[in-house]
């Protein structure tokens, strides 16, 4: 049984999918006008843990959007489109900016071992679906027109404050007031479709029944989520900052349009913060995965750091904590490799191992308690009660969720190469240095006869047990 903290009920609820043959999950994706910072990446790591845990029991359809248009600098529908701001900053087209940062995003995402979504949906490829949804809302009387766009009238939707509750919404109303509020009927009303400015040609704009312009950010997620997952999703995820505005608005749009419940479980991840305060993409104060790599950290050490904190607690980032995550990961891998060596690579499955697996799974199924699952992993690997093959079986399973490459890399270091293999490798390096490819191949065969495969990597030769 799996429990998830549901923002909508303010409660840890038992997870019951609508259809056990396919769980549906939508995760808000990146706005690709700049690099993702490690705070954004923390959210994708938590979503990956959720996806891997669900997949222990059910097939999962996981949809993620790419916001490549229409996300305004301010949450209050004023300011410029973030994509156009990025384009102006870098002297590139808005389309090139989107392409470049999206590709960079996936590099980081993969490096952190986040499982790719089943469907990746770009906002710019779904403009017609968004227009259709706005039309439905218009027909049902939820919209009105101002000089700069088509707006959603939040006073028409009586459950508008359901996700956060009255207190938080009152705070939001204060914060969401904007210059053009004269034309807005309610402070919480938001743009569904924005008109292109009359005096300026936008790079990204489309025809619509209301005039040339571009979609609001919130409508994008509602339109794409429902296109791929139906009117009611099992799970919708995102960072905690999305609760008060983005997700509240998604509910208002979707439920007003369909008359059905939009999401059964709202799951939100807490922020990664800096000692100096908030990590903000638009404010420019952010650390990227590239920065960590330049400083010599492995991306998976960052994953380890994130696993060590529950997703619903704030995590303060520091380089000291990165150092300690790096050390812990190295030690865990060393122990994993020792178990693998001692067991000669043969895992042993039995009831004892199953009990450890169950303990691990129970932690993950208790609202994704990754710190506990990690603690169980350490306990198992140090346990005198488990033989090497049993540890190996457990660790292989745990790593399908933790995904920390527990057996990679360290393998070569922990399993010291026999002197003969090391000698042949050295000779092969010399042969390759002299471009003697024939000899190099002969030496590879000789190494293979001793039971090792040689791989040529950018870091040089690596020999691994076959
Ligand atoms: P964005 O690309 O800004 O739309 O954000 C992508 C995801 O990262 C969203 O789910 C945000 O809620 C989340 N996010 C933004 N800042 C942080 C942070 N400092 N820590 C964790 N998640 C964040
Ligand atoms: Zn979204």
Image: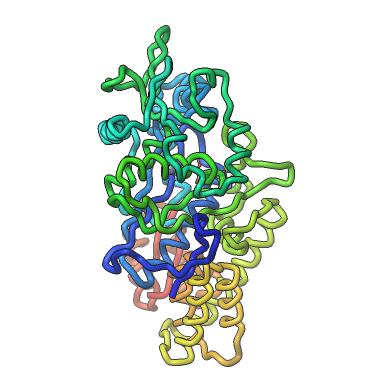
Residue found at the very far top of the displayed protein: 199
Quadrant of the rendered image containing residue 174: top right
Q: Position of residue 104 (x, y in %)?
A: 45, 40
Q: Nearer the viewer, residue 254 or 99?
A: 254
- In the image, is 132 to the left or to the right of 351? left
Is residue 381 at all visible to an observer of this figure? yes
Location of the C terminus (image quadrant): bottom left
Q: Position of residue 429 (x, y in %)?
A: 46, 59
Quadrant of the rendered image containing residue 67: top left
Is residue 97 at all visible to an observer of this figure? no
Task: Tell me the residue at 43%/62% (across/down).
Answer: 428
- In the image, is 246 to the left or to the right of 256? right
- In the image, is 270 to the left or to the right of 192? right
- In the image, is 90 to the left or to the right of 261? right
Residue 294 against residue 430 in the figure, above or below: above
Q: Quadrant of ligand 2?
A: top left
Residue 402 against residue 143 in the figure, above or below: below
Task: Tell me the residue at 53%/76% (across/down).
Answer: 336
Task: Tell me the residue at 42%/36% (across/down).
Answer: 156
Residue 261 against residue 348 in the figure, above or below: above
Task: Tell me the residue at 57%/63% (across/down).
Answer: 307
Report the coloring of the rendering.
Answer: rainbow
Location of the N terminus (image quadrant): bottom left
Q: Position of residue 97 (x, y in %)?
A: 42, 28
How many badges with numbers are in the image? Answer: 0
Q: Position of residue 344 (x, y in %)?
A: 44, 84
Residue 80 against residue 400 in the figure, above or below: above
């Amino acid at each position: 049984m799996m429990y998830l903290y549901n923002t909508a009920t303010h409660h840890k609820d038992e997870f019951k999918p609508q259809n056990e043959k396919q769980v549906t999950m939508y995760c808000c994706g990146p706005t690709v006008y700049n690099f993702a910072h490690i705070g954004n990446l923390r959210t994708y790591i938590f979503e990956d843990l959720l996806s891997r845990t669900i997949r222990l029991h059910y097939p999962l359809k996981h949809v993620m959007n790419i916001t490549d248009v229409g996300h305004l600098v301010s949450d209050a529908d004023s300011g410029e489109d973030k994509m156009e701001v990025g384009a102006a900053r870098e002297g590139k087209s808005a389309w090139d900016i989107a392409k470049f940062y999206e590709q960079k995003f996936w590099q980081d995402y993969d490096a952190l071992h986040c499982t790719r979504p089943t469907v990746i949906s770009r906002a710019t490829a779904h403009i017609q679906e968004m227009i259709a949804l706005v039309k439905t809302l218009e027909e049902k009387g939820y919209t009105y027109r101002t000089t700069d766009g088509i707006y959603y009238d939040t006073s028409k939707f009586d459950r508008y404050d359901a996700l956060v509750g009255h207190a938080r919404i009152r705070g939001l109303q204060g914060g969401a007031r904007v210059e053009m509020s004269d034309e807005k009927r309610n402070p919480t009303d938001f743009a569904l479709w924005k008109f292109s400015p009359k005096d300026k040609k936008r790079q990204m704009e489309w025809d619509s029944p209301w005039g040339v312009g571009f979609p609001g950010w919130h409508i994008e997620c509602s339109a794409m989520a429902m296109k791929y997952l139906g009117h009611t999703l099992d799970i919708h995820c995102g960072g905690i900052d999305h609760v008060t505005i983005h997700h509240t608005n998604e509910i208002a749009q979707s439920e007003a349009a369909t008359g059905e419940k939009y999401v059964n479980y709202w799951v939100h991840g807490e922020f990664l913060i800096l000692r100096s305060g908030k990590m903000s993409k638009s404010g420019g104060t952010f650390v990227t995965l590239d920065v960590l790599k330049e400083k010599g950290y492995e991306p998976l050490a960052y994953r380890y750091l994130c696993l060590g904190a529950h997703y619903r607690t704030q995590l303060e980032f520091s380089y000291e904590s990165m150092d300690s995550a790096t050390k812990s990961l190295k030690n865990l891998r060393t122990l994993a490799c020792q178990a693998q060596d001692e067991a000669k690579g043969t895992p042993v499955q039995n009831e004892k191992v199953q009990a450890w697996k169950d303990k691990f799974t129970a932690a993950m199924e208790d609202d994704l308690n990754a710190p506990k699952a990690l603690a169980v992993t350490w306990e198992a690997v140090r346990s005198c009660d488990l033989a090497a093959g049993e540890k190996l079986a457990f660790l292989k399973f745990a790593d399908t969720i933790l995904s920390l490459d527990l057996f990679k890399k360290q393998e070569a270091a922990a399993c010291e190469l026999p002197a003969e293999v090391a000698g042949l490798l050295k000779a092969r390096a010399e042969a390759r240095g002299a471009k003697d490819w024939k000899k190099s191949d002969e030496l590879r065969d000789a190494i293979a006869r001793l039971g090792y495969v040689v791989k040529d990597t950018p870091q040089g030769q690596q020999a691994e047990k076959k």
